[in-house]
């Protein structure tokens, strides 16, 4: 219990500094843990400082913003309160008004936050920022905090197009997104797991470039082809008629190696957001 209290206090202190406009938005506010026990860097692999946010010096001329002062551009406060404010607020509204899953879907939200964890969704959903394509503009990641080390599910990913937020990924009942980080490549990737039925599903491995996802590789299982149900694909249509048939061992090795790259972002809990 004491560790939990200390952890919440530390997060609250960090959040207060971030919202004061003193700290630029980190890719992660701590050391995220992969599902295989490995850890990803505390910042996205860019040319920016790798000093953990809590250790970055605060310029002596910096003054806390007042209610009439807009947060400094490029800071976490600016991204949370200005750039992505409406996108973040959508779920605040849903949770406060106790929307149903149907309400979420009809209003363009993922229903999955209502299915994860127990109690108030405000306690097991969070906000993080990752520079997926290293263009010095942060993508907004809305994701799962509940058992995130084993199920680092991402609910939504937003990017900026000409300065305007645009959603590029949203998880639902059939499609689930996950962040990946490769130390070997020093790069971020995204995995999309698609389930059409018990005997038709696939895992798609993507990279984010020029504001859109490009597929690197996919493994699809199509049980209707009972003798050769596993396929290698380079598209996302789930149609195996033009895909390469592979053996189960090869398919399993590719899926497992990619799952080892799944990374749980160190989210700011919704409960602590303004």
Image (spheres, helix red, strand yellow):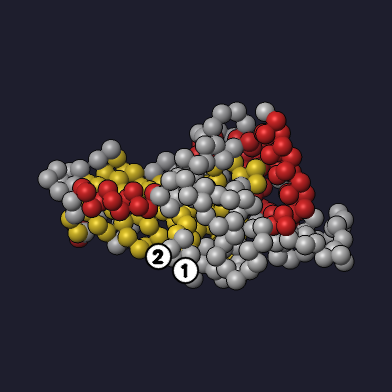
First in residue order: circle 1 vs circle 2: 1
Crowd rating for badge 1 (residues with CA inside 10 Å; few <14, some 14–19, many 20+): few
Residue position marked by numbered label 1 in the rendering: 209
The x, y position of residue 242, in whole percent, is: 20, 60
User: Could you tell me which secondary element the residue under label 2 belongs to?
Assistant: strand
Across and down, in percent, residue 226 comes to 14, 43
Query: Looking at the figure, which quarter contains the N terminus?
Result: top right
For mark 2, what is the residue?
214
Q: Position of residue 260 (x, y in %)?
A: 40, 50
Q: Seen in the image, is 270 located left or right of residue 173?
A: right
Left or right placement of residue 62 versus residue 29 in this view: right
Cβ atoms under marks 1 and 2 closer than 8 Å: yes
Whether residue 71 is situated above or below residue 152 in the rendered picture: below
At x 61%, y 47%, the residue is: 267
Toward the viewer: 188 or 31? 31
Residue 23 in the image: state x and y as whole percent: 73, 59
**Residue positioned 29% across, 62% down in the render:** 234
Number of residues whose C-alpha sits closer than 10 Å to that of mark 2, classed few (under 14), some (14–19) or many (20 or more): some
Whether residue 81 is visible to the viewer of this picture, yes or no, is no
Rendered view: 248 above or below 52 = above
Q: Which of 89 and 9 is in front in this view?
A: 9
Residue positioned 87% across, 61% down in the render: 63
């Amino acid at each position: 219990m004491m560790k939990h209290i200390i952890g919440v206090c530390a997060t609250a202190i960090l959040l207060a500094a971030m919202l004061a406009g003193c700290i630029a938005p980190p890719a992660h506010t701590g050391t995220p843990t992969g599902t295989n026990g490995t850890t990803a860097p505390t910042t996205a692999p860019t040319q920016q400082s790798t000093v953990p946010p809590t250790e970055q010096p605060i310029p002596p001329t910096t003054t806390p913003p007042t209610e009439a002062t807009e947060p400094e551009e490029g800071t976490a406060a600016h991204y949370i309160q200005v750039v992505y404010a409406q996108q973040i607020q959508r779920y605040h509204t849903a949770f406060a008004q106790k929307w149903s899953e149907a309400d979420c879907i009809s209003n363009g939200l993922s229903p999955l936050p209502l299915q994860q964890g127990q109690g108030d969704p405000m306690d097991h959903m969070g906000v993080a920022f990752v520079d997926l394509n290293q263009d010095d503009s942060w993508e907004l990641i809305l994701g799962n905090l509940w058992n995130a080390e084993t199920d680092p599910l991402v609910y939504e990913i937003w990017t900026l197009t000409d300065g305007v937020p645009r959603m590029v990924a949203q998880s639902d009942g059939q499609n689930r997104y996950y962040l990946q980080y490769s130390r070997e490549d020093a790069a971020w990737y995204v995995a999309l797991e698609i389930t059409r039925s018990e005997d038709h599903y696939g895992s798609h491995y993507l990279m984010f470039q020029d504001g859109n996802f490009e597929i690197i590789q996919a493994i699809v299982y199509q049980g209707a082809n009972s003798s050769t149900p596993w396929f290698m694909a380079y598209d996302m249509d789930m149609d195996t008629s033009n895909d390469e048939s592979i053996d189960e061992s090869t398919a399993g090795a590719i899926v497992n190696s990619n799952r080892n790259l799944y990374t749980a972002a160190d989210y700011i809990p919704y409960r602590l957001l303004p």
